[in-house]
């Protein structure tokens, strides 16, 4: 049984949309896609993502979790570029005042939260004609409007894209010993002077491609 975590309903498209009954738990929507797949729309942010992931594991018995969604890019990659995450970091986990490095998750003693089967996913997407990149997802409860901080995160973590959920999903999966997979699509750029407007304009244009790529990974012919 696999679970898919999205932050927002507007990130879901095509075959991943609900076709049956939607169950609401703690304000989060869950629905089955098939007998082996449950989708969670958790809400934006790390706490919501962690809640949704734990619910998928505890209530629905999933034994692997995927996170899919739009993301801001630290580089000049075209809008619509697919990124298969190699690992995630939580850039807003900061207890450096007591000597720990930025991003260290104390319960795990890790900074880099790994994703599974990365090369196999890349090969599958290439075969399906998507030409993805791989990279690092930097997660935090922050929409990247601070150029100085964005540059620091890009350089410190070798970050590719920025989101608000993947690192939290990865942490919950690691604590539960459940495999984690992550695919993001570029919707905006952290150094764009009108990033918010870029995001609003591009999200509707990229989610179809995101969900087609996810479907290609989940339902192999």
Image (tube, grey):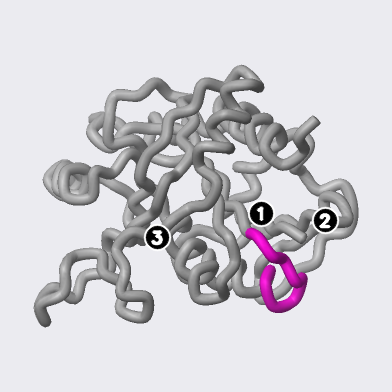
Q: Which residues are magenta?
A: 56-64
Q: Which mark is residue 113?
A: 3
Helix, strand, or loop for circle 3? strand
Label 2 neighbourhood size at 10 Å, few (<14), some (14-19), many (20+)?
few
Q: Quadrant of residue 145?
A: top left
Residue 131 percent location from the top left of the image = 51, 21
> Is 40 situated left or right of 107 in this image?
right
Q: Quadrant of residue 79?
A: top left
Q: Earlier in the sequence, mark 2 or mark 1?
A: 1
Q: Earlier in the sequence, mark 3 or mark 2?
A: 2
Q: Which residue is mark 2?
A: 36
Residue 9 percent location from the top left of the image = 65, 48
Residue shown at 77%/43% (left/top)? 17
Residue shown at 61%/74% (left/top)? 54
Residue shown at 39%/29% (left/top)? 198
The quadrant the N terminus occupies is bottom right
> Is 218 situated left or right of 32 in this image?
left
- The mark closer to the camera, 2 or 1, is 2
Task: Please count the marks in the image.
Answer: 3
> Is 126 situated left or right of 26 in this image?
left
Up-down: is 57 above or below 98? above
Residue shown at 29%/24% (left/top)? 76
**Tag 2–tag 1 contact (CB < 8 Å):** no
């Amino acid at each position: 049984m696999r679970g898919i975590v999205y932050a927002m309903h507007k990130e879901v498209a095509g075959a991943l949309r609900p076709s049956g009954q939607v169950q609401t738990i703690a304000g989060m929507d869950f629905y089955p896609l098939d007998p082996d797949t449950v989708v969670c729309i958790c809400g934006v942010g790390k706490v919501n993502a962690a809640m949704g992931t734990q619910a998928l594991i505890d209530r629905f018995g999933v034994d692997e979790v995927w996170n899919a969604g739009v993301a801001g890019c630290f580089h000049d990659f075209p809008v619509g570029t697919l990124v298969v995450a190699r690992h995630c970091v939580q850039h807003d986990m900061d207890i450096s005042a007591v000597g720990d490095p930025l991003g260290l998750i104390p319960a795990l003693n890790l900074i880099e939260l790994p994703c599974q089967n990365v090369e196999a996913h890349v090969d599958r997407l290439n075969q399906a004609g998507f030409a993805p990149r791989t990279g690092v997802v930097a997660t935090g409860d922050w929409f990247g409007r601070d150029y100085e901080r964005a540059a620091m995160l890009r350089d410190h973590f070798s970050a590719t894209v920025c989101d608000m959920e993947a690192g939290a999903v990865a942490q919950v999966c690691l604590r539960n010993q459940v495999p984690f997979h992550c695919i993001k699509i570029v919707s905006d750029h952290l150094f764009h002077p009108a990033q918010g407007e870029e995001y609003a304009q591009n999200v509707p244009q990229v989610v179809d491609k995101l969900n087609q790529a996810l479907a290609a990974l989940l339902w192999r012919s």
